[in-house]
Amino acid sequence: MKRKLVSMTLALMMGISLTACGSGGDDKPAADGGNTSTEDQAGDTGAADEGAGDTGAADEGAGDSGSSAEVANKDKPLVWFNRQPSNSSTGELDMTALSFNEDTYYVGFDANQGAELQGTMIKEYIEANIDSIDRNGDGVIGYVLAIGDIGHNDSIARTRGVRKALGTGVEKDGDINSDPVGTNTDGAASAVQDGSIEVNGKTYVVRELASQEMKNSAGATWDAATAGNAIGTWSSSFGDSIDVIASNNDGMGMSMFNAWSKDNKVPTFGYDANSDAVAAIAEGYGGTISQHADVQAYLTLRVLRNALDGVDIDTGIGTADDAGNVLSDDVFVYNEEQRSYYALNVAVTSDNYNDFTDSTKVYEPVSKQLDAGAHPSKKVWLNIYNASDNFLSSTYQPLLQNYDDLMNLEVDYIGGDGQTESNITNRLGNPGQYDAFAINMVKTDNAASYTALLSQ
């Protein structure tokens, strides 16, 4: 898919007057917020300490915009990332949130393209290993599916992608049903159907043996521990029928791989290309999908940097900036109507996994330092919905911390508990001390919880 980017000229007075209101104060939200399980990930990061603890730097960032005019919080640059504001039941985008002000955007990845890649990767693996993959020789290729969050657009897309590729999808309301089926060893579930694959003149049945949302007792979704427990239950009940494991992400996939499938030589396929999952491909992990987190993290901060500088939004993205940073149109697309940037995905398999072993390395085409004179220090409030989320904590945030220095941004990283929006919003008590905001919601429906704070 080619990038279709219509350059947007931002209002000049916004670019000239952007400055932090009240940023000279010493009070700030606590980065760790009492979340004792995420001290290193959310509350004690070097970048967070640097941005939050050095009040002199914060004062400098707030005062260097060349104007003494104050900017209302509702007019400051805002980027939603990783979780697109949308209706969790219908998937309809929340355009009110995406158009909160003229400097509001979303950064994520092309979920449908990535979902199709994952499904195709699994199907091709089955075809290439058909002689050994049917472990009990019953002519049925049975798979189990770990679903991350039934109300998350990305999770829905990945479930649909697997079912579409394997022929097990059933249409519901004009699209493939993404509901979990529980246990389906007899093939009688209504949310899926038996598919088929023909290889070397022989036809094999493909069946989704089981699937469930991996939500823990506290309500956190995409839960790796829950996935590990699930594969324990499934394997004890019908383990010899499980030929493939599919997971909506690597965190859950690796939990299942370490708990059972590695020892039983059952290929497991995840999503995110986390470093541990990529390394595990050498030990039998089937494959994963890189959603170009390096490009996403760059875009998350770049759109804020451009708005703060008052330059065209395409600067350093599709058009080279003054340092030479630029992205090619084969790694991202921009949807102007949705005000959304989407990174493109790459399948990571045994053929190319050595190229993806370091998931926190910045993307070389956009790795050049911005001049501090032309791009003065600014302060950003950024939250991670769940500081225990494997992808966000071990891949995305470290990338952000590498890019924030390159872009002269002082970022306070706030780690949530993955369960309640208030655990995060309660720590946005003084938005006036920040120049811009990057928000990763617990639930995609809850954008108004944040915009209401910024509108006060």
Image: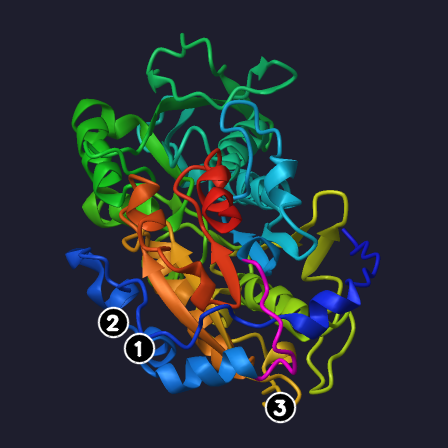
**Residue 231's spot in the image, x, y percent?**
24, 34
Q: Residue beneath label 3, please?
A: 371
Residue 253 or residue 399, whichever sits in front: 399
- Look at label 2 and name its amino acid: Asp
Q: Earlier in the sequence, mark 3 or mark 2?
A: 2
Q: Dot 3: few (<14), some (14–19), or many (≥20) neighbours within 10 Å?
A: few
Residue 278 or residue 113, whichever sits in front: 113
Q: Earlier in the sequence, mark 3 or mark 1?
A: 1
SS state under label 3: loop
- Give the Cα distance between marks 3 and 1: 22 Å
Q: Are marks 3 and 1 in contact (CB under 8 Å)?
A: no
Could you tell me which residue is drawn at 30 percent across and 26 percent down?
Answer: 241
| Rendered view: 42 above or below 333 | below
| Rendered view: 394 above or below 390 | below
**Residue 222's spot in the image, x, y percent?**
34, 41
**Residue 297's spot in the image, x, y percent?**
52, 65
User: Which corner quadrant of the image does residue 197 belong to?
Assistant: top right
Residue 206 seen from this side: yes
**Residue 248's spot in the image, x, y percent?**
42, 40
| Rendered view: 8 above or below 143 | below
SS state under label 1: helix
Part of the protein shown in magenta: 64-72
Q: Dot 1: few (<14), some (14–19), or many (≥20) neighbours within 10 Å?
A: some
- Look at label 1 and name its amino acid: Asp
Q: Residue beneath label 1, please?
A: 49
Q: Are marks 2 and 1 in contact (CB under 8 Å)?
A: yes
User: Which corner quadrant of the image does residue 107 belong to?
Assistant: bottom right
In this picture, residue 143 sits left or right of residue 237: right
Count the marks. 3
- Look at label 3 and name its amino acid: Asp
Residue 343 seen from this side: no
